[in-house]
Amino acid sequence: MTGTVSYHAGLAAEDIVARDYQRRGSAVAHRRWRGEAGEIDLIAREGDLIVFVEVKKSRTFDLAALRLGRRQMDRLCNAALEFLAGEPKGQLTEMRFDVALVDGRGTTRIIENAFGAP
């Protein structure tokens, strides 16, 4: 039963984040896009920019952030490269990795360019 609850909580968190991106003018192009390397929760477009979004939900933002580890970041990067292979500019496509944190109240905190240099 816990797995089913977690699955539905994850879907609800992704819905909240997708609406947040749309409200800010982004077009959500894909939800739960799956390639051989893995799954990307949301892929949004902001003009020519592709935004790969990993959604993490927990009771607090800090706990949600702790749920993203190095192996998962590597998997996301590999899946993003796979996705970009289908884009006209390929790996030359402008892109960004965001992490969207959702707390127990459904509040979001978006960390833009979460994998980029400070």
Image (spheres, grey):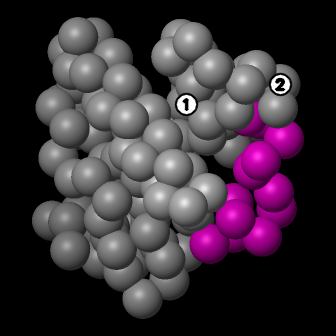
The quadrant in which residue 69 appears is bottom right
Res. 99 visible in picture:
no
Query: Mark 1 = which residue?
Result: 100
Q: Is residue 59 above or below residue 38?
A: above
Q: Residue at x 31, y 48 (%)?
A: 43
Chain-order first, disc 1 or disc 2? 2
Rendered location of residue 4, percent (x, y): 48, 59
Q: Nearer the viewer, residue 20 or 16?
A: 16
At label 2, the amino acid type is Asp
Element marked by disc 2: helix
Question: What segment carries the magenta color?
Answer: 64-75
Q: Nearer the viewer, residue 37 or 108?
A: 108
Tag count: 2
Using residue 30 as the reference point, say whether residue 74 is left or right of it.
Answer: right
Please report the residue visible at 69 percent of the width from the left and 33 percent of the height from the top: 58
Which residue in the protein does label 2 denote? 62
Vertical order, 34 against 68 (above or below): below
Foreground residue among 116 and 111? 111
